[in-house]
Amino acid sequence: MFSTLKTERLVLREITMDDAEGIFACFSNLNVTRYYGVETLGNIEQAKAFVDFLKEKRGISWGIEIKVTKGIIGTIGFNAWPQSKSEQR
């Protein structure tokens, strides 16, 4: 089950395919992607593929939504990094 987190102003929620346009708006911006570690998106199909990638559960990613508006304004999450050999001991 995916937890939805709420603050006074924000909702952090599961990202769905309905968020592809919001994902594209965020990740088609070079000023965003240069610090995010992903390629800048060039079209909506790439945004849909990015949503699929986030849903593969290699970590957890929330869509950030302002309560009084509809649609995400960004993402936040944790990546699942493979353990190094020294950590596996």
Image (spheres, grey):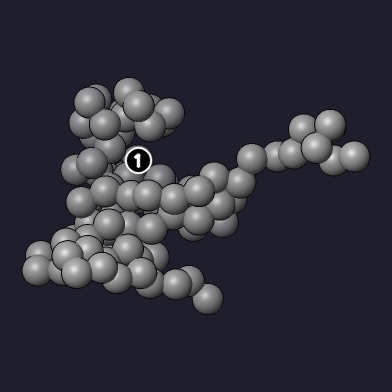
Q: Position of residue 50 (x, y in %)?
A: 40, 45
4 or 23: nearer the eye? Answer: 4
Residue under label 1: 46
Considering the numbered disc 1 on the image, is that residue within a helix, a strand or a loop?
helix
Q: Position of residue 48 (x, y in %)?
A: 35, 50
Residue at horizontal 30 percent and vertical 33 percent from the top: 41
**Residue 12 position (above or below residue 40):** below
1 or 17: nearer the eye? Answer: 1
72 or 66: nearer the eye? Answer: 66
Farthest residue, direction bottom: 1
Res 82 → quadrant = top right
Q: Quadrant of the C terminus?
A: top right
Residue at horizontal 20 percent and vertical 51 percent from the top: 73
Q: How many labels were placed on the picture?
A: 1
Q: Position of residue 72 (x, y in %)?
A: 22, 57
Q: Is residue 84 left or right of residue 61?
A: right
As shown in the figure, which amino acid type bears the numbered disc 1?
Gln
Residue 86 in sight in this render: yes
